[in-house]
Structure formats: C-alpha cells, structure tokens
Image: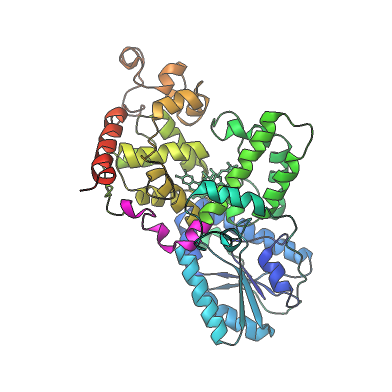
Amino acid sequence: MFAFSRDLRLSDHAGLAAAARHGDVVPVHVVDPVSAARLRRSPRRAAYYCAAVRALDADLRARGSALIVRRGNPGPALRALARATGASVVGWSCGYDAKSIRRDRDLQSMLEEAGLRALPVHDAPAVPPEDAAASHRTGDGYRAFVPYHARWRTLLPTADAGTAAFASVEIASEPLPVPEEFGSQASVAEPAGEAAARAKLTAFLAAPALQYGVARNVPAAGDTSRLSEALSFGTLAAREVVRAACERAEDPFLLVEERTSLKLYLRALAQRDFFLQLAWYNESLAEEPLQAKMRGFVFARAHAHLDAWRSGRTGYPLVDAGIRELRATGWMHPRLRAIAASFLCFDLGVDWRVGRDEWDHYLIEDDPALAAGNWQWVAGVGADLAAYPRIYNPLKQARRFDPTAQYVRRWIPELAALPDAAVLDPLVGRHERQLQLPLFGRASYPAPVVDHEAEARAFLARYAREVRTPA
Ligand SMILES: Cc1cc2nc3c(=O)[nH]c(=O)nc-3n(C[C@H](O)[C@H](O)[C@H](O)COP(=O)(O)OP(=O)(O)OC[C@H]3O[C@@H](n4cnc5c(N)ncnc54)[C@H](O)[C@@H]3O)c2cc1C
C-alpha cells in the first residue's frame, strides 16, 4: 500500500517504487489534520491541491486503478485500510518540516505496533539528506550552502526511480477533496497534475531557462520556471527536473551565458535540497533561529506600518509590487521575495516569523521547510556565513533590477502613468506632481512609510552592539 501526500504523481516516484518492490500497490490518500490546516490557510493552495489530487486519480484510473481517499489521522486510517486490503507494507514520502516529521514518526510507530512494515522514503529532494550528509564530518547535515552545493553536484540523480503496478481492490473511496471543504472558493489559474507540470518544465527548458541568469533577478525580463507549486505538491519529481536541466546543458550549441543560466538553475534546485536537509536535521528551524548567537536578538512582533507592508502600501514601489503580485496570484518572483522580506525585517524591524506566516495565507506552495529556511536566511539568523545582515536598499534594487519600471507598473496601477524615475522612487518630483495630478488623494500611492537609510543604519548599529560585540 502507498499513501500519497505531497508527491501527487506516478512517475519517477521514489516512495511508490519502494512500495512496489513489495507487490502490487494499493494507492491511498489521507487528508490528515496537519495538511488540512495548511490548506485552510491559503484558498489558492487548496484549489491547486484539489486539482492535483483529481489529476492523480485520473492518471490512476487510466491505469485501471483509483485513489482510495480517507480523512482523519493517518495512523488509524492506514491501519484499517491495510487490514481491509491485506497489505503488510505501508509506504509514504517523508515530510521535512517539524510538524510533518512528527506526524510521520507517530505514523511509523502506530503502524509498527499494528505489525505492519512502515516504509517512509525520501522523495521530495533530488538528493536525499542522508546521501549528502554521508561523507560530511558531523554526519548531521550542512549548515552552509557552498560546501553543500559542492557535495550535491557529485550526487546528481541519474536514473528514474522505477515504476509501480497497482492492485485492483474493491474498496469504496471517500469523495476526492474539493476546495470548499477547506473554505476555499478559489479556482486554479492553470492546470495542476503531472502532465501539466511536465509540459511546463519542457516549455521552460526549451527557451526561458537559457535566460534564467537574468530572469531570476529581473522580474520583467522573462520567466523563472514557476515550478515551485508542482515541486511542492510533488506533481513533478525534483530528480526529473535536475536530470532534464543537466541534459539541456549538454546541448553543444549553447552560448556561454545560456550554459551559465542552466548552471544557475541547477544551483536553485540545489538550494531547495539544501533547505530541505536543513529542516530535516534541525527540527526547531520553523521557530528558532539556527544561529545560536541570534536567539536572544529580539525582533518586534508589531509595527505601526506592518499593515502597510502586508497590503503593499509601504511607499517603496518594488516592495509593494512584489507583495501585490503575491496577493493577486499566490506566487512572488524570487528576487522580490528577498527584497520584501528584507524590508520587513530590517526597515520595520519585524520578526521573520510574522512575515513567513503572513505570506503563508497567499502562497500556493506548501513548503514550510523552504519558507523557514529562506526567511531565516534573509533575516540573518539562519544558514548564512555573512558577517552582517544583508539589507537590501529597495530603491537601488528597483533601479538595478526594474530599470524601466515595467514590473512596478504591472502591479501598481497608481504609478503606471508616471515617468520611469518617478515610478522607481516616488519621492522624485513628488511635490510638482502633487500640484498637477490628483494622484495623492486617499486612494493614491502612499509616501514611504519609513526612511530606508535611517532604519538600515539604526538596525546595523543595534546589530553591532548586541551581536558583533556582545556584553
Ligand atoms: C523570503 C523568502 C521566502 C521563500 N519562501 C518560499 C516558500 O515558501 N516555498 C518555496 O518553494 N520557496 C520559497 N522561497 C524560495 C524561492 O523564492 C521560490 O522557490 C521561487 O521564487 C519559486 O519560483 P520558481 O519556481 O520560478 O523558481 P526558480 O527560480 O525557477 O527555481 C526553481 C526551483 O528551485 C527551487 N528554489 C529556487 N530558489 C530557492 C530557494 N531560495 N530556496 C529553496 N528552493 C528554491 C524552487 O523549488 C523552485 O521552484 C522563498 C524565498 C525567500 C527569499
């Protein structure tokens, strides 16, 4: 028996292949309380997940099988199903955030107590944590990306995980999950499921991947792969993405920049594995700074301008454009995530956990381990060897990465009609425009809520006082 979770596909599936080594597989899916709580948090996430489960069920039906759905705690549900189907082995894919790790541990003991063989398998990362850690000195994973990446590159997955045959069982399924049961009225913007995810990967590798080096920094310059949702719900294997990108890089007709772009794309996938293994070996990552020296450094939980940040009205156009993109689509461009997160932590001095939890209400991705790792990294409390926090200047970032203000105009219509320089820095010519245009009334774009330069310097001074030279 195999219990699908955030691995909603049939091919290149490490867990499914492992279960299939014990005989024909009964495919089940338990809508458990941990996952249900996360689905209730983000309506678009719930819609995407339901569409991906539907696609998986359709793929199983095309192979003469069907998904057996249950709701509730996975232990009792899977035990009962194993009894009903005569299964002696129950496989599933490991989770990487602390709540999922605890749930998996409980599941394992409950199944083993019932005399069943529990088979948790690493499927989400392209390179399983233990494989990367095997030759590592401490044996408990990496805390710095550069050495991890050097090791990861030597472990790239070469072969498909294998295929499975499905048992024909006559057991009634509960209805497939629908968005409404998670309080969601949202619909999916594009098809979910394995075929759709693979088509997206193929289209990306055909051309946009060759410009990735620019697109990952310049939001208006082209497309990043936008595979985070598919990877998060496992409609596509990270192994497959890595293999396909490596194959693409073998094209002898690539230009140097195109080859570099593919290398950078592979590096992004390595970052995903890095943060997954970081969460795997550090279960407190979701709540506690990884760096011991930062555990006593207190960020604020509230700020007079927190709501301005939440709603994309800080008066810093690039920050606001990123947040508005997230709220409108359930996804934010990678560079914008770093800039908007930095603004919250350093310009407003607000705790990274507040920002992470806020975005969790909008993101389609369901990756608490990646969210925690990245937020800690931006806030300078996590896996980072930098001597000082990396504080982004949102105005300089705008001039550098959105020089013609194309991205800002797309998400901030209030600024669309202004000249480039004024869009990138709303203080430019503000006074004259105020006289000419009805732009700064109640519904208009706000003035900056804080002075970036002053806040950044104040933060660095406090950091130097409390962290660099502790009493
Ligand atoms: C503050 C902050 C919060 C973030 N929160 C999340 C989150 O909740 N969920 C999430 O999946 N990613 C998160 N990221 C990482 C990254 O921004 C997204 O994965 C990326 O924007 C997704 O877009 P894409 O698929 O086009 O990525 P691409 O640039 O095309 O990258 C390909 C894939 O590599 C992986 N990847 C790329 N960058 C990273 C990274 N820094 N860390 C981990 N994996 C990465 C993702 O799976 C991504 O789909 C966060 C980054 C920051 C700075």
Span shown in magenta: 277-294
| Residue 376 appears left or right of 170 | left
Provide residue 148's location: percent of width, then percent of height: 55, 51
Q: Nearer the viewer, residue 458 or 24?
A: 458
| Residue 196 appears left or right of 352 | right
The answer to whether residue 214 is above or below residue 17 is: above
The answer to whether residue 434 is above or below residue 20 is: above
Please say whether residue 279 is one of the residues in the magenta stretch.
yes
The quadrant in which residue 464 appears is top left
Is residue 208 at least partly visible in the picture?
Answer: no
The answer to whether residue 214 is above or below residue 230 is: above
| Residue 362 appears left or right of 94 | left
The quadrant in which residue 163 appears is bottom right
- Residue at position x 69%, y 34% from top? 259
Looking at this rendering, what residue extends furthest in the left direction?
A: 471
Provide residue 448's location: percent of width, then percent of height: 31, 28
Provide residue 404's location: percent of width, then percent of height: 51, 20
The colour scheme used to paint the residues is: rainbow
Q: Main secondary structure of the magenta part?
A: helix
Q: Nearer the viewer, residue 41 or 250?
A: 250
- Residue at position x 75%, y 32% from top? 254
Looking at this rendering, what residue extends furthest in the front direction?
A: 137
Is residue 149 at least partly visible in the picture?
Answer: yes
Please say whether residue 322 is one of the residues in the magenta stretch.
no
Figure disc tally: 0
Provide residue 266's location: percent of width, then percent of height: 63, 44
Q: Quadrant of the image for the N terminus?
A: bottom right
- Residue at position x 66%, y 83% from top? 88
